[in-house]
Image: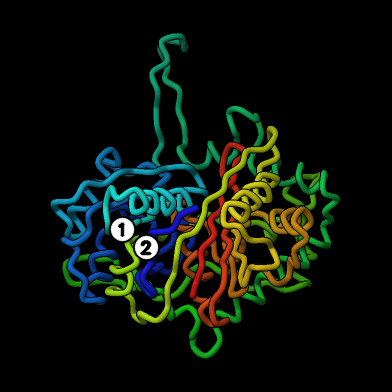
């Protein structure tokens, strides 16, 4: 359990998420993320030189990714501060936030910045030496697609792991379609009144396409209109499965930033010092081979236990749900109302840029709890390798 790490209210942002091969497809994710963070600091009147440590969460290799941490720190204006690269697939946000919290808890630094940035579009294509190949022919790897399609340990594609969990929990095609429609309707709530909820935290991304032209991305790109009839007309992706392309997320691009600091500094930086956001606990889990979605519930239990609270104490639950089966399995395991989770949307609907996905969900969860007058927030999500991570935050 953490006692000293705080997030300033509105000391965070998420860009809109752009569809795969969309408006952000050609942008270097670390460069764009640092530039966006710098603009965010300027909009808040923050001095980036006060940041003592930058934690960059990223999962898809970019050119000179090797230098991500200190490079990003320098680009966003914290030239004298070190930085580190954290990468753990879809749990990168949760782990980065926890590591920043540990930095505050131990006194290693007093003011950290988590920058979560990824671009799934136009991912790198790697070649590896293979002296044993015919004529020394190298091995080729598509950094993003090949890894989504096969876990080298479990030997299965990610969608197969979700189908395995659906079968074990008795989840049906109808349940997946009904939940997908529910998540789409919840996302529509975030768009009400001219996107009033999203504007509480969303910060535009700027793309310079030429010396004289800059494109500003102000809203999510790629969200598909979803109807009961449309979902019913889709075939399962796997012939023996319950999941369609409608009931799973899509790769996307974007970035998020979150300040993690001391209680006093959080009050100083907060848009409303009477609102406190405390990072309370972290949980993790790994399940059996090719059952990725089943790891979410035990990771949530660990985070709740470390926080000393129960499911009934939660004001909001946000999850990374790459497949509709994820939320259904978690709800059955923990006794949750699956329809009350993920208010205002989730990655199932607005896409999955990997590293920033969890950060956006956490940010949305903070804003939801603030609207409800305070309380506990749980974020949980699965990650590659049949793992999962969760965090609990307290808004008061």
Instruction: Give x and y (percent) for residue 264.
Output: 30, 69
The circle drawn on residue 113 is 1
Q: Residue furthest left?
A: 80
Labels 1 and 2: the sequence-earlier one: 1
Q: Give percent across and percent down for residue 104.
A: 34, 54
- Is 44 placed left or right of 184 in the picture? left
Distance from Cα at disc 1 to Cα at disc 2: 6 Å
User: Residue at position x 74%, y 66% from top?
Assistant: 338
The residue carrying mark 2 is: 258
Q: Toward which corner of the image does residue 185 lie, by quadrant?
A: bottom right
Q: Are marks 1 and 2 in contact (CB under 8 Å)?
A: yes
Instruction: Determine the residue located farthest toward the bottom in the rendered image.
Output: 193
Q: Position of residue 214 (x, y in %)?
A: 25, 71
Q: Residue at x 67, y 47 (%)?
A: 298
Q: Is 68 or 233 nearer to us in this picture?
A: 68
Q: Quadrant of residue 211?
A: bottom left
**Disc 1 secondary structure class:** strand
SS at mark 2 in the image: strand
Judge the density around disc 2: few (<14), some (14-19), many (≥20) Cα neighbours within 10 Å. Answer: many
């Amino acid at each position: 359990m953490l006692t000293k790490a705080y997030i300033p209210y509105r000391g965070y942002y998420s860009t809109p998420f752009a569809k795969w091969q969309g408006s952000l497809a050609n942008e270097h994710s670390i460069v764009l993320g640092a530039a966006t963070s710098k603009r965010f600091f300027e909009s808040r009147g923050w001095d980036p030189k006060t940041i003592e440590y930058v934690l960059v969460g990223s999962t898809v290799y970019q050119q000179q990714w090797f230098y991500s941490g200190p490079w990003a720190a320098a680009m966003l204006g914290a030239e004298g501060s070190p930085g580190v690269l954290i990468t753990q697939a879809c749990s990168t946000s949760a782990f980065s936030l926890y590591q920043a919290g540990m930095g505050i808890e131990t006194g290693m630094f007093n003011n950290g910045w988590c920058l979560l940035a990824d671009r799934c579009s136009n991912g790198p294509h790697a070649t590896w030496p293979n002296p044993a190949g015919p004529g020394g022919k190298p091995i080729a790897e598509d950094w993003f697609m090949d890894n989504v399609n096969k876990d080298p340990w479990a030997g299965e594609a990610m969608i197969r792991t979700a189908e395995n969990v659906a079968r074990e929990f008795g989840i049906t095609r109808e349940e997946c379609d009904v939940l997908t429609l529910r998540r789409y309707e919840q996302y529509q709530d975030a768009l009400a009144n001219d996107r009033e909820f999203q504007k509480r935290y969303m910060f535009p991304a700027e793309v310079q396409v030429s010396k004289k032209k800059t494109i500003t991305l102000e809203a999510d790109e790629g969200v598909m209109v979803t109807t009961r009839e449309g979902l019913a007309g889709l075939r399962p992706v796997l012939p023996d499965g319950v999941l369609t392309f409608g009931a799973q997320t899509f790769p996307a691009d974007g970035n998020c930033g979150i300040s993690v600091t001391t209680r006093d500094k959080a009050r100083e930086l907060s848009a409303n010092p009477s609102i406190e956001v405390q990072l309370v606990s972290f949980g993790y889990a790994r399940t059996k081979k090719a059952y990725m979605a089943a790891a979410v519930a035990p990771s949530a239990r660990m985070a709740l236990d470390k926080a000393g609270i129960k499911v009934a104490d939660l004001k909001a639950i946000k999850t990374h749900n790459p497949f509709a089966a994820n939320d259904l399995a978690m709800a059955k395991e923990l006794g949750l109302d699956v329809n009350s989770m993920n208010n205002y949307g989730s990655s199932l609907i607005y896409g999955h840029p990997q590293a920033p996905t969890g950060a956006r969900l956490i940010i949305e969860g903070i804003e939801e709890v603030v609207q409800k007058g305070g309380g506990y927030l749980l974020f949980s999500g699965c990650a590659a390798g049949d793992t999962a991570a969760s965090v609990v935050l307290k808004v008061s």
